[in-house]
Image (cartoon, helix red, strand yellow):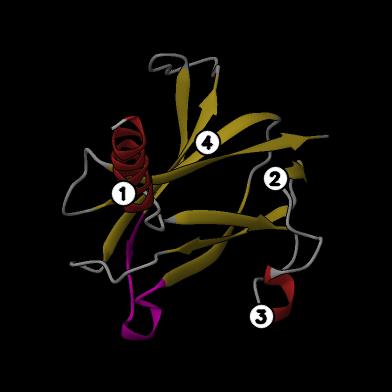
Amino acid sequence: MKKLILFLVTVLIFCFNSAQAKEKTFILFNKHPITNETITSTSNTNEFNSGERIYYLIGFPEKLYKKSLLIQIFKVGGDKDERFGHEIVWGKRVKLKTQQHNFYTDYIVINQNGVFVMKVYSRDYPTKILTSANFYVKN
């Protein structure tokens, strides 16, 4: 009887854990323009110099219902215009093209030092964060 209960508990744990293995939206930062070669290169980093181009790739494992995004960058521990210790530094509304149904890539330049968080929202559900990632800018 103990073996049967142990087996059933093991099967239930396996079922619950395998259901959570769904792929999620991600952000990849790089010092060079995003291409097939640079996606897997060692230049992928989240540490950048002030005034340097920060290339980013936002990947979606499945198509978005509406192809419209809101991308925001917050400075953690900002000085002025703080909102719970975060200062909005940059924001962009993006309409994805038909060939961009699983990704979006662009670059930004930040001229101040600090810790930053990039957050990506769907315009259909602006209160739900699709993904977020930290990066650092220094001199």
Residue that badge 3 annotates: 36
User: Would you say 87 lies left or right of 120 here?
Assistant: right
- Dot 2 amino acid type: Asn
Secondary element type, mark 4: strand
Is residue 68 depicted above or below 75 in this figure? below
User: How far is disc 4 from disc 2 in space, using C-alphas?
Assistant: 11 Å
Q: Could you give the CA–CA distance between mark 1 and mark 3, rounded to whole angstroms?
A: 35 Å
Q: Which residue was labeled with disc 1?
A: 15
Instruction: Say whether disc 2 or disc 1 marks the residue closer to the N-terminus.
Output: 1
- Mark-to-mark CA distance, 2 and 1: 35 Å
Q: Which residue is denoted by mark 4 in the rendering?
A: 117
Q: Name the residue that disc number 2 marks.
A: 46
Upstream in sequence: badge 4 or badge 3 = 3
Question: Residue 18: x percent and y percent?
Answer: 37, 52
Answer with left or right where residue 98 lies relative to residue 46.
left
Q: Is residue 51 left or right of residue 83?
A: right
Q: What amino acid is at disc 4? A: Val
Find out whether the residues at labels 2 and 1 contact each other: C-beta distance under 8 Å: no
Q: Which residues are magenta?
A: 93-102
Examine the image and state in which quarter residue 111 appears: top right
Q: Is residue 94 magenta?
A: yes
Out of 41 and 105, give the one closest to the viewer: 41
Disc 1 is placed on an element classified as helix
Nearer to us of marks 4 and 3 is 3
Q: Is residue 132 one of those drawn in magenta?
A: no
Q: Residue at x 55, y 17 (%)?
A: 77
Residue sitting at x 37%, y 46%: 14
Q: Earlier in the sequence, mark 1 or mark 4?
A: 1
